[in-house]
Image (spheres, rainbow, N blue to C red):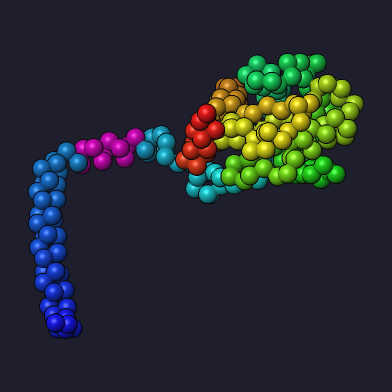
């Protein structure tokens, strides 16, 4: 016997009444639970409010602006820090500190990239998206005296381009040949993962993998003491952002790479 529209309507009406009864019983339970914990809520909220008012720990300008995963913004900020003439006003402090940090903490990084530390009177060229016949490296830092060349390829959510690291290494070899062996290529990702195309990279191409979550985070925090308070606050906020850049997708990729 075919089901009529009236039967369907009656069924839906009974279902709605049934659902309403469940909602009412659930609401009654929630209200009962709320009455039980209500005496302690005000004190807890007052303490949380007072803590936020004094510390503003939840305020992070990078997260509010929604730039925490915008690769180009990270490149610009890092390049400005590494530039002795950057807006931070700290001269070559960050550049010297970063290169010394990489020498001691980053596997495969040239142990003596700096023959001496950069001073205010030295000219260091720092540029993002430098146009060259070898592509557009995300960050390039080059100095004639002391002679060195550094390229940082920055990857947050984007994949590798064809022969990208090989091309950038050739740029270091041929475009900045005056630096001799004082050259380095860094592959920067949130977790420090290996390049997607690593099996195709020629053996003579030397690069080091570094991570936002560990290396950049640790380096930023090591630079904070002694800096102006305005700069300290910004660097702390940025360190908090980079420490959380590792996505679930990247963690899954790392787990897959570790499988035999």
| Residue 188 percent across, percent down from the top left | 64, 34
Q: Residue at x 17, y 82 (%)?
A: 2
When the figure is inspected, residue 128 is found, relative to residue 117, above or below; the finding is: below
Position of residue 260 measured from the top left corner of the image (x, y, whole percent)? 52, 28
Q: Residue furthest front?
A: 1
> Whole-percent x and y of residue 98?
67, 24
Image coordinates for residue 103, horizontal then vertical, percent: 69, 18
Point 77% across, 20% down: residue: 113
Q: Is residue 47 magenta?
A: yes
Q: Is residue 252 visible?
A: yes
Between 199 and 28, the residue placed more toward the observer is 199
Magenta residues, as a range? 42-51
**Residue at point 88%, 32% (across, down):** 174
Q: What predominant SS class does the magenta segment belong to?
A: helix
| Residue at the right extreme of this rendering | 178
**Magenta region includes residue 255:** no
**Between 192 and 218, which is closer to the camera in this rendering?**
192
Nearest to the observer: residue 214 or residue 227: 214
């Amino acid at each position: 016997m075919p089901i009529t529209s009236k039967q369907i309507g009656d069924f839906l009406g009974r279902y709605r009444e049934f659902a309403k009864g469940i909602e009412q019983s659930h609401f009654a339970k929630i209200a009962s639970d709320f009455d039980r914990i209500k005496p302690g809520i005000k004190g807890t909220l007052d303490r949380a409010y007072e803590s936020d008012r004094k510390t503003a720990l939840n305020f992070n300008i990078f997260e509010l602006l929604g730039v925490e995963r915008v690769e180009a913004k990270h490149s610009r900020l890092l390049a400005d820090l590494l530039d002795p003439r950057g807006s931070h006003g700290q001269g070559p402090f960050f550049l010297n500190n970063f290169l010394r940090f990489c020498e001691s903490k980053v596997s495969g990084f040239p142990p003596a990239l700096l023959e001496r530390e950069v001073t205010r009177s030295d000219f260091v060229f720092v540029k993002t998206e430098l146009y060259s016949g070898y592509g557009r490296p995300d960050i390039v830092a080059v100095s004639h005296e002391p002679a060195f060349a550094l390229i940082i390829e920055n990857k947050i959510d984007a994949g590798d381009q064809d022969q990208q690291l090989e091309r950038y290494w050739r740029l270091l070899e041929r475009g900045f040949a005056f630096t001799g062996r004082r050259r380095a290529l860094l592959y920067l990702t949130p977790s420090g993962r290996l390049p997607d195309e690593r099996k195709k990279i020629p053996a003579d191409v030397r690069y080091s993998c570094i991570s936002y979550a560990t290396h950049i985070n640790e380096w930023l925090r090591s630079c904070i003491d002694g800096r102006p308070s305005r700069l300290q606050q910004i660097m702390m906020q940025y360190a908090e952002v980079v420490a959380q850049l590792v996505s679930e997708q990247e963690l899954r990729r790392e787990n897959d790479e570790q499988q035999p």
